[in-house]
Amino acid sequence: MFEVTTAPYVVLDTDFRIRGVNAAYLHATGREREELLGAYMFDAFPDDPRDADATGVRNLTASLERVLRRGAPDDMGIQRYDIPDIRLAGAFQRRAWSPVNSPLTDADGHVVGALHHVEDVTAVHEALYRAHRDDRTDTARPPAVVLRRAMLALTRYERAARAVAAGRANPGGPSPSAVLSVAEVARRDGLWHAVLHAARHTRPRDCAGAVCEAAVRELSAADAAVITLHGEGPENFQLAVSSSWGRRAEELQYITGEGPSLTAFDTGERVLVPDLDHGAARWPLFAEATAGIAVGAVFAYPLRTAAATLGTLTLYRRRGATAPAGPPADAQAFAEITTAVLLADMDGEIIEEIRATADRDDLNTAIGIVAATQHISPSEALTWLQTMARAQNLPLADLARAILSQYPQDPGPHR
């Protein structure tokens, strides 16, 4: 069935090497079985190095990571992913695909690979794009539900493409006309492999921590890395840090209410401060506070999706460290990789961790309120809360928040 079906399929192992490929996939890509079997997926199908906006490798990698980590299928919608033209050396063919990736498990239920099912939708994509662009009406329309799904997928793709193009055009970002060299593509792929290998071989909740450690290991002259997720207001969640020194440096931004990470999140642009002494006029409180812990340089990168900025990846360098004057090489590419890794877990483990942290904070505050109002010890207050939660058949965190709602929190001094 695998071989004779008209649906293109590829079998990948956990290192993304091609272990099986059917005739339909060979026909869709114009490749030979012998050149694909055993090849690394993204060596066989790299991004076009002349297209600085190419996202095929990044998006497919993130999808496959979700499949391997969660053991559940992942539908990518419509994905622009140009492929090498075997007729012309160095040339690429414009293609749009509809990929779905599914887990492959052994007899014990362990994920041992992924099944990559992809349909070439280039012709449909181009037709829909022209219809959308020219605002023309086709009398021979497909069923309404098919059309709605196709247009929704196209809209998502175009929105993402516009956001990426806008990001490239930002003064702080790479030139939209930048062309990646073969060495740069190889280095970017190497970063992908290093980060994803580190993330995959950790417990789910340690994934972001592995990314921070990889940042310090892979990026030259970065002494600490911090990943922080940001809310709409003053709320933030310090997702992972590479060291306690980095955590303290990041916390000082939120204590003083200013700094490169906050600016990067607010503007959506990277903020590079190779000498914090020269940044003192822009963030005087932060510069003064960090002088006591010898922070010499800060490089903050927004973690951006097509629709929003999730947070920041901030790299810190100690004062007096022997290092180049500018930011670490490949830091921008590393931030893009970090965003993809976070997106792979954003609706799963990371959200659970954020909720667990919020629950702990609310519970600790409620314990303090109960202890103070009933004149009992904190341990007795916790026992009281647990008893009340069981009696009311409520989760402990929900009871804690109900108590907090009766005691408005002091907002503190306004800046």
Image: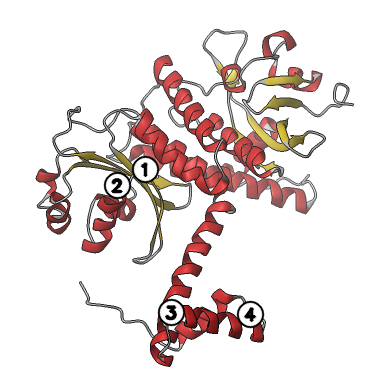
Which residue, given by chain and number where applicable, does mark 1 sit on?
242
Q: At numbered mark 4, what does the secondary structure look like: helix, strand or loop?
A: loop
Kindly identify the residue that appears in the image at 33 percent across and 31 percent down.
Answer: 175
Quarter where residue 177 is shown: top left
Q: Is residue 250 visible?
A: yes
Do residues under tags 3 and 4 come within 8 Å of each other at their CB atoms? no
Sooner in the amino-acid sequence: mark 4 or mark 1: 1
Which residue, given by chain and number where applicable, does mark 3 sit on?
378
Relative horizontal placement of residue 374, taking residue 55 as reference (left or right): left
Relative horizontal placement of residue 6, taking residue 259 as reference (left or right): right
Q: Is residue 118 visible?
A: no
Which residue, given by chain and number where applicable, does mark 4 sit on?
394
Local crowd size for mark 4, using a 10 Å CA cut-off: few (<14), some (14–19), many (≥20): few
Do residues under tags 4 and 1 come within 8 Å of each other at their CB atoms? no
Kindly identify the residue that appears in the image at 60 percent across and 14 percent down.
Answer: 85
Instruction: Give the foreground label among 3 and 2.
Output: 3
Which residue, given by chain and number where applicable, does mark 2 sit on?
246
Sooner in the amino-acid sequence: mark 4 or mark 2: 2
| Residue type pointed to by label 1 | Ser
| Residue type pointed to by label 3 | Pro
- Cα separation, mark 2 vs mark 1, equals 7 Å
Do residues under tags 2 and 1 come within 8 Å of each other at their CB atoms? yes
| Residue type pointed to by label 2 | Gly
Query: At which x and y percent is residue 67?
Result: 66, 40
Q: Is residue 66 above or below residue 405?
A: above
